[in-house]
Image (tube, grey):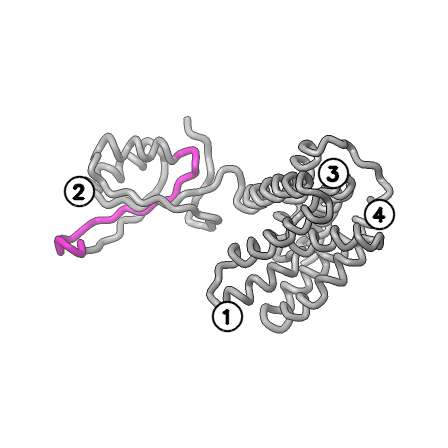
Amino acid sequence: MAFRLFWLVIGSAIVATGLEIFLVPNSIIDGGVVGISIIISHLTKLPLGLFLVALNVPFLFLGYKYIGKTFVISTFTGVTTLALFVTLLHPVPRLTGDLLLAAIFGGVLVGTGVGMIIKNGGSLDGTEILAILAHRTKGFSIGEVVMFFNVFILGSAGLVFGWDRAMYSLIAYFIAFRTIDVVIDGLDESKSVTIISNKPNEISEAILARLGRGLTHVYGKGGYSKEDKEILYCIVTRLELAKLKSIIQEIDDSAFVAIEDVHEVLGGGFRKKAIH
């Protein structure tokens, strides 16, 4: 738990740096509760940290009731430490007045910090809690709900700060969104590959010999042909995927291949390695 809290605090400090050194001084906002807090703080001239905590409190109660205590404790830790770091960094001058640079570097820092917090079981945004509940009760995806809120929040930025700032805010939000994925999944993400071929043994042996990857043989039956099928399943890194497809193509160019993203791989002797 102490290790998790350590990374929650570090993540909050990184987000605060992105906000106070790059985004907020240039009137560029992030999405969610953070974005709403920036707008209200600008209009009222009250501290940003105050609204970061106050606006998240109702969502924390919802999260405690419907999601779980551990998640809420982690989220509360992230939110309060973010508010503290934002307050401490507020007197620090901005590093650049170039809006594009501010959007890029602010987005990267915010995405990095948020990714670290999510990876350690927390959140900085109460709208994510609402999105989880909407997903459970109404069937909407979490991404759809979050995007719905952020359309209105970024639109509000246009009314308050000007439409050029809203467009830069959209750039920062997109960069932060993609950076979160990189932090959570890693640069060298894994892929699961399902192969249905009339030459399963040849493909299996080639993958073992040339990629050094293990496979699982699954036995099934064709839905149309009713013939017995031998299905190969393996996991490779993104960098190994092109070579794997090349191996399959060489041996059986009519093989059926399905490729999916894998966010995490545990056990089974799986190791990420470079292709030689």
Quadrant of the rendered image containing residue 256: top left
Specify which label sits upstream in the sequence, 4 or 3.
3
Label ID, residue 22: 3
Three-letter residue code for mark 2: Asn
Local secondary structure at mark 1: helix
Which amino acid type is shown beneath numbered disc 4? Leu
Distance from Cα at disc 1 to Cα at disc 2: 45 Å
- Give yes or no for residue 91 being in the magenta stretch: no
* Residue 239 belongs to the span the image colors magenta: yes
Disc on the earlier residue, 2 or 3: 3
Q: Which residue is mark 4?
A: 88
- Compare marks 1 and 2 and give the one earlier in the sequence: 1
The residue type indicated by label 1 comes to Thr
Give the spatial CA distance, label 1 vs label 3: 38 Å
Check if mark 1's residue and mark 2's residue have beta carbons within 8 Å: no
What's the CA distance linking mark 4 and mark 2? 65 Å
How far is the residue under mark 2 from the one under mark 3?
57 Å
Residue 32 is situated, as x and y percent measured from the top left of the image, at 65, 54
Q: Residue at x 80, y 36 (%)?
A: 94
Residue 114 vs residue 270: left or right?
Answer: right
| Residue position marked by numbered label 1 in the rendering | 137
From the image, state whether disc 4 or disc 2 is nearer to you. 4
Q: Residue beneath label 2, please? A: 198
Q: Residues within 10 Å of mark 2 (few under 14, many from 20)?
A: some
Residue 56 is situated, as x and y percent measured from the top left of the image, at 71, 62
Give the mark nearer the N terminus: 4 vs 2. Answer: 4
Instruction: Please give the range of residues in magenta.
Output: 222-240
Mark 1 → mark 4, Cα distance in angstroms:
39 Å
Residue 256 vertical position relative to residue 117 in the rendered view, above or below: above
Taking depth in this image into account, of 152 and 88 the one nearest to the observer is 152
Judge depth for marks 1 and 2 and give the one in front. 1
